[in-house]
Image (cartoon, rainbow, N blue to C red):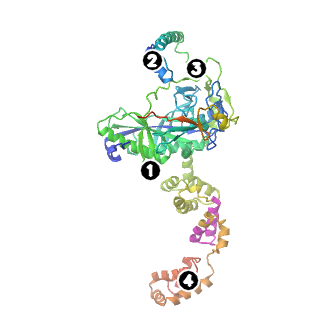
Amino acid sequence: MSADATISFDEAMEKYDPVLGFEVHVELNTKTKMFSSAPNVFGDEPNTNVNEVDLGMPGVLPVVNRTAIESSIKIGLALNCKIAESCTFARKQYFYPDTPKNFQTSQYEDPIAYDGHLDIELSDGTIFRVEIERAHMEEDAGKLTHMGGATGRIQGADYSLVDYNRSGVPLVEIVTKPIEGAGSRAPELAKAYVAAVREIVKNLGVSDAKMERGNVRCDANVSLRPHGRERFGIRSETKNVNSLRAVEHAVRYEIQRHGAVLDSGEPVIQETRHWHEDTRTTTSGRAKSDADDYRYFPEPDLVPIVASREWVEELRATLPEPPAARRKRLQAGWGYSDLEFRDVVNAGVMDEIEETIAAGATPTVARKWWMGEIVGRAKNADVDPGQLGVDPATIVELNKMVEDGRINNKMATEVLDGVLAGEGTPAEIVEKRGLAVVSDDGPLLEAIDAALAAQPGVADKIRGGKVQAVGAIVGAVMKATRGQADAGRVRELILERLGVEG
Amino acid sequence: MAAINRDDVAHLAQLAHIEMSAEELDRMAGELAVIVESVKSVSEAAGDDVPATSHPLPLTNVFREDVVGHTFTAEQALSGAPDAYEGRFKVPAILDEG
């Protein structure tokens, strides 16, 4: 398959205006499936979390999971949607081995939530409003593994294996209205939008929200039109873009690809594209001819869902503080500048700093440790900072030791490394390694006298007024005390010894 | 509602994976046309103030609590499968290529 032509992103932006649209699928973390009482658990042995409903046996009766409905309403409310007074399920018919019934139970004309919006904050603080068309309920499909062929992809496979454990897992599909006006920030907005949806469903507690497990999956629609034209261009839909980084890359790539197609004078083909993380490109999905003719009709086995206003208000009352409001509150409480706070958010340590402050650290101390020490170590270890294994209590303890003058900052970072290496608590490590600031002047003066005697030329220079030469002596003393002295105090004592004004 | 012709029936048969002879297509096109006509008379009776009916039963909100029930073993799940491999259903290659 030859690679598609692309033009540079800047060139595409000069000539064209991108329009985006997203369909984000959120897997709910209910204990059981949408229409059956089989467990909703990830990672179990294939085809063990299934019963007759999930396998689409003839004559079975699906029954709706109440908790899944409540979670769907909560998602709708968190997306500022209206909640339908009454809605139904429908059959979406197609033949594909991941769907044993040969139809997916979904919602069609009357989604449970509609007409919402989400305000997305971009990295420089700009707020961009994304309009939500609808959020509807449906069920997930089974998992296919394509065997044979060179790449494990669907293209060239000899056969496929199907695990129906995921079949029937409750899904909420969130569909945006066309997003106009993002311009060159389209890739960033794409990433920020999916991140915001993920944050909301995680905050609501209705989904595990792990993209690497497919709990949140994004289909990204992209089209381009010449600047100034109102009518949309023809769109492509890139399926299952399953990491935040990939969402940004996929949108950027499709903009560059569409730009090249339009430049050549050809029309863009409306089609499904597959995202390839390894090459950061998309390829044509070659959709089947009947893919858009699903012949929806009302599901006869499921009666309508009526969401009374009392029920909706009860659910609204249980909603947690929205993530954006929480960020505002935390920033104000901590007294961080916009830049400091944004860095904390982008580094992914806001929750950790909140916990550290709750454990007794000041906001300044918490930020110093997380941003100054832990984020860098996490980056080196290629894990999220929160997963490095630093307990907020450890930071509080380390900081107290520094404030009490028992250890200095350099030792404290050494102790942190010890904690991460599993050597014990800070107190135990300080004890074990014999770390303590030498604060008794006696041993320090001994070391100073030895250093001055060893470097008489330097001592003379200092006596003669070249105070900056003191560094050589401080260094020698620090070396002699294996870094356990307070360097500031050492400097004072040397100058005192030589009768020079600091 | 548009009338149903023979091409529509052939298209639907293809989507539903139902093999139909030329004779069956002719007959079905005629029968479906009558059914569509009959259903049309319902929309004449119902005014704009009558919402579309999805179900004939006066029932709503039939729910199940979110409590785990029975499951099959993989062996039971696969017992009716034409082919299986390592606990999973084995199906022919999916994309028609070429």
- Give whichever of discs 2 and 3 has the lower sequence position: 2
Q: Position of residue A435 (x, y in %)?
A: 63, 74
Mark 4 belongs to which subunit? A
Callout 1 secondary element: loop
From mark 3 to mark 1, how far is it between C-alphas? 49 Å
Label 2 lies in what chain? B
Residue type at the position of mark 1? Asp
Q: Name which residue type carries label 3.
A: Ser
Residue at the disc numbered 4? A493
Is there CB contact under 8 Å for labels 2 and 1? Answer: no
The answer to whether residue A78 is visible is no
Q: Where is residue A128 in the image (x, y as percent from the top left)?
A: 45, 42
Q: Where A98 falls versus A322 (above or below)?
A: above
Q: Do labels 3 and 1 share a chain?
A: no
- Nearest to the eye among marks 2 and 1: give it: 2
Which residue is disc 1 drawn over? A124
Marks 4 and 3, how far apart at CA: 90 Å
Compute the Cα span from label 1 to label 4: 49 Å
Which numbered disc, 1 or 4, marks the residue closer to the eye? 1
Are tags 2 and 1 found on a single chain?
Answer: no
The front one of A242 and B79 is: B79
